[in-house]
Each structure stands twice: as structure tokens, then as C-alpha cells.
Image (cartoon, helix red, strand yellow):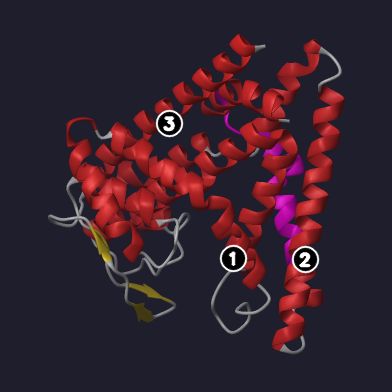
Amino acid sequence: MLTSGALMLPAALLAEWALGFPRWLLTRVGHPVMWIGALIGALDRRWNRGSPYRQRIMGAAMLALLVGASAVVGAMVQHALLQSLWLWPMLVLAATTGLAQRSLADHVEAVAVPLAAGDLETARMAVAMIVGRDVASLDEAGIATAAIESLAESFGDGIVTPACWLALAGLPGLAAAKAINTADSMVGHRDARYRHFGWASARVDDALNYLPARLAGVLLVLAAGRSWRTGWRVMRRDARGHASPNAGWPEAAMAGALGRQLGGPVSYDGELAPRATMGDGPRPNARDLAKALVIWRRACGLLWAFAVIVAGAILWVR
């Protein structure tokens, strides 16, 4: 698994960056993450009831079912496509479904372009597609902050984490990682409905992302160029203040790289939620969002270069 996954990773990253997930295929059959989400929704409606103890048990059972089924499907696809060298392009394309470089770039650029033009209403509608906070009253700084934080966090859990699990465990590892991440995004909340049912999903997702999130932070620091020292200092100082044990690392690294302050209180469903701040300096603006995209692209390039080095080392040893 390690060998095949690590060898396909550079090609998968490059193919996903260039092609993304075809829109025509999305409209016809959906995306694998959508299939997982549909199953989570069905199990949530059926199993999320009863006492807190029962909710925790059923939430853990749901996660085990999701991870097991996803890993089995991934293993079956990988086994079928490893039978011939001619099928390797199909294997690489299958791996691209678990990566999110192109999708993330498209969504953040959809915020950056109108924001740079001063069209706050369009920028608000675009940023609402990638964040869960209230956006109706966000000004330029609020929109830029939300988009930059989403860009940095998603670099970790949407790109680096699946890349690591693809390299370590091939398609089964990638599929299992996406199942865990999707479950956490849907039910891993602390509200009354999901505090117990989503407990296992949230805790397992924290473990899954622990090392990749820190690697993502380091890659963003390295991508910062001449401001890498500030990025490193801010990441080490502020990452642990984030409510998430993982999201703070890439977000703090990006804050330091930009020389701007991220974090701070935001509104969810009309209620103000306190959050720690990360970084120093003023709040970001449209130009900072454009700069964040440049840093993010460099970090994606560094991840690809690292994947090439690992694949080359494996081939050399073999």
C-alpha cells in the first residue's frame, strides 16, 4: 500500500490540480464525498436518538461502518486497477477524487475577484459557500479573514491530510480519510444534536489530521518566502490557542506569513462566538487575500515536490 500510494501521489496531485473533478460527471453521478454524505445523513436520521450513551455508541458504529465500507471499496478499486500498467492512469484519476486543490482554488478565487473589485455583496455570497459563519454583515476585512482562514485550514484537511493517507495506505487509506473528514464536517459539532452522536467522528478526525496539519503549517511557512521566520514564530506562538487542535497550525502560519491578524470573534446563527486571535498587524484586505492565494499555490508546489522526492526515493531503493 505504501509503495503504490506514494508512487501515485505526485501524478494524482498534478492531475487534480490540472483537471479537478469533471463538472459533467458531478452533475450525472455526483462526487464520492456526496455519496458518503448521503449515507451519513441517512444514518443520522435513523440512529441519532435515545440517551447520550446510546448516541455515542451509535455514532461510533456509524463511523466504523463508514470507514470500513470506504476502505473496502478503495481496496477493491485499487486491486482491480493494479492488474495492468495500462490501468495506472485510471488509478491516478481515482485518487484525484480525494484531493481538493482545484476546487479550493476555484472557491477562494470566486471570493477574491469580486472583493478586489469592491463588490462586497458578491464576495459575501461566494464566501458563504466555504464558511459556516454569518456573512451578511461582513465588511472587506471580515470577508478576507473568512476566506483566508478557510484557505489555510482546507490546505491541511482537504489536501495535505488526504495526500498523506494516500501515500501511506493507497486508495483504501484515502477513502477512509475522506469518510472520517466528511463525518466530522457533518456531525462532529458541539451543539445539542451532535454533541454525543458526533463525538467519535470529531475525536478520530482530530487524530487523523494531527501530523498532517502540522506539516501543512510548515509548508505554508516555507512558502512565505522572506517572511518565513515571522510565519514560524507566529505558528509556534498562536496555533495552540485555536479551538481546534489542528486548524490553528496552518491558519497561524498563514497569519504570520501575511503579517496580518486572523481569528477573533465571529457570529454563528446570530450568536457571537469568541475566538483567539492569530498573528500581528492589521486585519487583512482584498490584497492580502490575493497574496494568501500566492502563498497557498507555492505550498501546493512544495507538497508536490516532496511527493516527487519520496516517490523517487522508493524507486531508487527498489
Discs 3, 1 touching: Cβ within 8 Å: no
Q: Earlier in the sequence, mark 3 or mark 1?
A: 1
In the image, 263: left or right of 23?
left
Circle 2 residue: 62
The majority secondary structure of the magenta stretch comes to: helix
Q: Is residue 39 above or below residue 223?
A: below
Q: Residue furthest front?
A: 317
Instruction: Report helix, strand or loop for mark 2.
Output: helix
Type of residue at label 2? Met
Image quadrant occupied by the N terminus: top right
Q: Is residue 310 above or below residue 183?
A: above
* 147 vs 62, nearest the viewer: 62
Discs 2, 3 touching: Cβ within 8 Å: no
Alpha carbons under labels 2 and 3: distance apart: 33 Å
Q: For residue 166, which quarter of the picture?
A: top right
Residue in view at x 81 percent, y 52 percent: 68
Residue 22 among those drawn in magenta: yes
- Point out the stretch of residues depicted in magenta: 18-41
* 75 vs 102, nearest the viewer: 75
Alpha carbons under labels 3 and 1: distance apart: 26 Å
Circle 3 residue: 300
Residue in view at x 29 percent, y 65 percent: 138
Type of residue at label 3? Cys
Q: Residue 243: give x, y in percent of width and height.
A: 40, 68
